[in-house]
């Protein structure tokens, strides 16, 4: 076990150390028991990621300048990464517990898929940052703190975790979350200060509650301390400048009016055929009674023998008689034609009920 | 009555036979009551009880359902009887020994009429032999269909090539020095193109309501073509006319009312479609059987009750050039050159010549070319036209597109393709494939009827639109039948279908990596059929 800091300079005599050489050097030093690294990078990727101290009770610390992509990607809890200056894409990609502090801006997809740890950025972050962040409830929620703003398409498909976008130094920016952020967001919380626009319609934008304020007050202190900006605390804690973005709960999802309501309220009054047709918009069943019948029975005394065969065979009990006069109740009759079929004297005749609208 | 003479029409001559199980029947009468074709009726059948040897045989009368055997009243296989039967005692069965068409012609000395669809369907569909096979994987990212924002709109109207845009320098600023041809960015699916008369007022209004709803509530800029049977003045004078493409065909039905309404119109219509021909019966004019010429149809169209036959040609047109001069110019002029004017022809061996000719368009007034394939629907047609004339849409659309490509003029006159789309279940897939082959958009009519409740199919079921006895209340003017159609359900179903199609189109755009319509992206298509590959110039795969 040694606390001595290992200093690695990755560019000497115009010869650049490759990513593989650097990462393998770091691993071998860790295996020797070293835990502190200062790395003057030259664009090497994945620095600080997927590493753990030989003694699992100890922490690893990386102080990095000029890293390549994916600094702190796939980093574990117990890893502390301090980047002096800006870092390109994928800072903290799949972060699984590390603390990553970037004293500068981040490229695109910062904190992409982060599921643990804390990422602190003192500047701006690029597009699709925070996309697919998630929270496994067996572990602490990931946190992603950005002092300024994010590029567009941030937090797409976010499933969990907390992002805090402080909107500092954003006076000339229309939206501190860029355009079309939060598309497909189903979980997690984004706190944002300042102007936002063009956010996906699957989220709800709310005011802060006490719990939110408590979280932000203590969290901001820690964040500002890490990025050496304690002086901004008062400026950033005017809570009515903050909003909270969460996925829209099902019961708040806007339901469109039905087409029927639209026809009744917005459509041409009395219908576009209203000057020709008085339509009550009633709907007939396939075997309808009354005016909905395709055929209707007509009775004529054709030497009726009053046998009541029609009356007794009518499936609708629609036939009545009085003084040897038979009649059919149009409110019951469906026009099936059984009366016509069974009458031995052919008193019943089915006639067409076809007619046109007027 | 049993058939006695061999020349009498018999049940076995008919296309459908009623299969009836008297042991299940409770004689509720619903089947006969629901049959709009009067094809079945209850009858009393006399049955003989066998003698026990001691007495003479006795007879009993039982009530059964029988089918009518006549040219006028016979089963079309619509199946309303089995829908209403509580016990499954009755259904229509296709008769493999059907001789109806022979018997009809022999008995009537008249051509056979049908509605709905072509019923031969012998070739199979080219579109079904095509798959979307160029999927964005490692080459370029596919798009998330559920969440990505897609731009599905397509131009309707004349597009000028860049070299024809006339700019001038005015006060140091670049400005257009002349008016551009009118152009509308619309959803790539145009609905309708079915006339008032051919379909019921409820169905027509349901389509119009659905169109307005999709625009106003859902923000989907779908346009509806009116068909040529006139347009209700109340619609012309409403703001919703801006979603309507007014059609003029050879009959010019209802145009006097449109002209009279012009001073009172608060919005311009979405466009004008000059219909030269239709895919289901190319070279034949419109046909509206007298049974559907209801009083209001007579009024709107300005005709008496009679079989209405539109001429197969516009009688004032003798050449393509003249059609550009007369029809395009007049229709453009009618709306002060502010409304795009397109033309619809039936797909034909000659379509490319027409399109090439239109592409010259010296006046910049040809706003679209609609090609209608042979699988299209119709309210009524002579069966001979329906089954034996026409041209499939796919290769014709492709030919036209490539003809424009060879001149470097693709997209200048937008192409719209239609005719039987959605026939095998996926309208979005058909639309997408045609767009990849070069269509700017597609149009559909018959599918809307199916969405609203039409039970016909491409193998002879129902297809009796010409009779005016549509059991679903769609292709009829009869009150009892029309009122079977719930206008709100029909309109809602159309809306829902469009929303589903919209999602499905995106499900196809995502994988090919297009966030805008992939017009002409034939590299996205593959086929295992070499002939199809050669003809359409798409990739053959195996």
Image (tube, coloured by chain):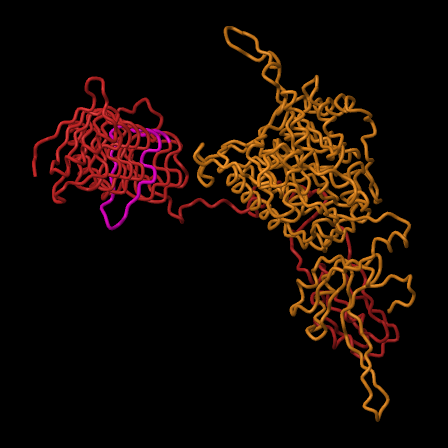
Chain colours: A red, B orange
Is residue A131 found inside the magenta-colored segment of the image? yes
Q: Quadrant of the C terminus of chain B?
A: top right
Q: Is residue B422 visible?
A: yes
Q: Which residues are magenta?
A: A125-152
Is residue B84 found inside the magenta-colored segment of the image? no
Of B342 and B241, the residue lying toward us:
B342
Where A225 sits versus B14, above or below?
A: above
- A327 vs B160, left or right, is right
Residue A213, given in percent of the width and then of the height, sits at 22, 40
Q: Is residue A358 visible?
A: no
The quadrant where residue B315 appears: top right
Residue B147, given in percent of the width and then of the height, sits at 44, 39
- A110 vs A344, left or right, is left
Of B300 and A107, the residue lying toward us:
A107
Of B304 and B5, the residue lying toward us:
B5
Residue A207, given in percent of the width and then of the height, sits at 30, 39
The quadrant where residue B305 appears: top right
Where A299 sits versus A9, above or below?
A: below
Residue B341, given in percent of the width and then of the height, sits at 68, 27
Count the numbered circles shown. Answer: 0
Where B29 sits versus A137, above or below?
A: below
| Magenta stretch: dominant secondary structure | loop
- Rendered residue at 53%/10% (across/down): B174
Q: Quadrant of the N terminus of chain B?
A: bottom right
- B193 vs A47, left or right, is right
């Amino acid at each position: 076990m040694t606390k001595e800091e290992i200093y690695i300079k990755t560019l000497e005599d115009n010869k650049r150390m490759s990513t593989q050489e650097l990462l393998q050097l770091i691993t071998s030093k860790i295996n020797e028991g070293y835990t502190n690294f200062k790395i003057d990078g030259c664009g090497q990727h994945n620095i600080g990621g997927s590493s753990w101290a030989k003694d699992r009770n100890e922490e690893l610390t990386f102080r990095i300048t000029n890293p390549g992509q994916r600094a702190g990607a796939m980093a574990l809890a117990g890893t502390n990464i301090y980047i002096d200056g800006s870092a390109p894409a994928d800072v903290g990609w799949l972060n699984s517990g590390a603390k990553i502090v970037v004293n500068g801006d981040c490229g695109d997809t910062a904190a992409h898929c982060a599921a643990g740890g804390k990422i602190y950025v003192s500047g701006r972050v690029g597009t699709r940052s925070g996309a697919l962040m998630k929270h496994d409830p067996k572990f602490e929620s990931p946190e992603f703190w950005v002092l300024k703003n994010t590029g567009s398409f941030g937090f797409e498909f976010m499933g969990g975790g907390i992002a805090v976008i402080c909107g500092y130094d954003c006076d000339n920016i229309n939206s501190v979350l860029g355009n079309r952020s939060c598309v497909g967001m189903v979980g997690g919380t984004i706190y944002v200060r300042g102007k936002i626009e063009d956010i996906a319609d699957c989220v709800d934008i709310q005011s802060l509650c006490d719990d939110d304020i408590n979280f932000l007050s203590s969290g901001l202190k820690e964040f500002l301390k890490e990025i050496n900006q304690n002086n901004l605390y008062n400026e950033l804690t005017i809570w009515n400048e903050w909003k909270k973005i969460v996925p829209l709960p099902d019961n708040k999802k806007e339901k469109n009016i039905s087409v029927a309501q639209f026809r009744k309220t917005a459509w041409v009054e009395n219908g576009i055929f209203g000057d020709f047709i008085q339509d009550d918009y009633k709907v007939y069943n396939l075997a309808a009674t009354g005016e909905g019948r395709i055929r209707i029975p007509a009775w004529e005394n054709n030497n009726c023998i009053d046998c009541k065969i029609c009356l007794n065979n009518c499936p609708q009990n629609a036939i009545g008689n009085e003084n040897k006069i038979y009649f059919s109740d149009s409110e019951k009759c469906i026009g099936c034609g059984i009366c016509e079929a069974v009458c031995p004297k052919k008193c019943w005749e089915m006639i067409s009920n076809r007619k046109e609208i007027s | 009555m049993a058939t006695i003479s061999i020349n009498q029409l018999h049940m076995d001559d008919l296309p459908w036979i009623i299969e009836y199980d008297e042991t299940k029947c409770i004689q509720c009468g619903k089947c006969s009551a629901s049959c709009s074709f009067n094809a079945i009726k209850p009858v009393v059948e006399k049955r003989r009880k066998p003698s026990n040897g001691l007495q003479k045989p006795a007879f009993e009368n039982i009530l059964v359902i029988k089918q009518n055997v006549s040219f006028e009243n016979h089963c079309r296989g619509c199946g309303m009887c089995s829908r209403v039967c509580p016990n499954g005692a009755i259904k229509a069965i296709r008769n493999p020994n059907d001789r109806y068409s022979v018997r009809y012609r022999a008995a009537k000395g008249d051509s056979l009429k049908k509605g709905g669809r072509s019923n031969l369907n012998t070739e199979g569909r080219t579109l079904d032999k095509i798959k979307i096979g160029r999927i964005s994987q490692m080459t370029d990212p596919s798009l998330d269909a559920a969440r990505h924002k897609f731009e599905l709109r397509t131009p309707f109207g004349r597009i000028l090539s860049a070299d024809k845009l006339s700019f001038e320098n005015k006060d140091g600023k670049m400005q257009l020095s002349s008016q551009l041809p009118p152009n509308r960015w619309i959803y790539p699916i145009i609905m309708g193109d079915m006339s008032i008369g051919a379909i019921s007022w409820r169905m027509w209004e349901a389509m119009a309501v659905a169109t307005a709803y999709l625009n106003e509530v859902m923000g989907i800029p779908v346009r509806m073509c009116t068909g040529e049977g006139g347009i209700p003045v109340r619609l012309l004078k409403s703001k919703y006319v801006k979603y309507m493409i007014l059609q003029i065909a050879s009959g010019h039905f209802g145009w006097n009312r449109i002209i009279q309404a012009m001073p009172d119109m608060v919005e311009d219509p979405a466009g004008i479609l000059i219909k030269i021909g239709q895919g289901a019966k190319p070279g034949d004019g419109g046909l509206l059987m007298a049974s559907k010429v209801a009083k209001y149809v007579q009024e709107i169209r300005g005709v008496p009750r009679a079989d209405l036959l539109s001429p197969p040609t516009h009688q004032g047109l003798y050449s393509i050039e003249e059609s550009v001069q007369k029809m395009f110019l007049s229709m453009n002029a009618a709306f002060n050159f502010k409304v795009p004017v397109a033309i619809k022809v039936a797909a034909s061996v000659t379509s490319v010549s027409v399109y090439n000719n239109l592409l010259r368009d010296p006046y910049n007034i040809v706003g679209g070319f609609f090609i209608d394939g042979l699988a299209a629907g119709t309210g009524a047609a002579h069966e001979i036209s329906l089954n034996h004339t026409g041209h499939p849409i796919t290769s014709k659309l492709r030919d036209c597109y490539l003809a424009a490509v060879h001149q470097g003029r693709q997209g200048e006159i937008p192409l719209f393709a239609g005719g039987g789309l959605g026939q095998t279940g996926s309208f979005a897939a058909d639309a997408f494939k045609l767009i990849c082959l070069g269509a700017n958009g597609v149009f559909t009519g018959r599918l809307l009827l199916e969405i609203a409740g039409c039970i016909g199919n491409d193998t002879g079921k129902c297809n009796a639109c010409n009779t005016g006895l549509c059991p679903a209340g769609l292709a009829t003017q009869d009150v009892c039948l029309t009122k079977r159609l719930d206008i709100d359900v029909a309109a809602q179903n159309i809306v829902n279908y469009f929303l589903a199609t919209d999602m499905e189109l995106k499900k196809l755009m995502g994988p090919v990596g297009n966030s805008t319509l992939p017009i002409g992206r034939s590299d996205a298509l593959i086929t295992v059929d070499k002939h199809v590959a050669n003809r359409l110039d798409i990739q053959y795969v195996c």
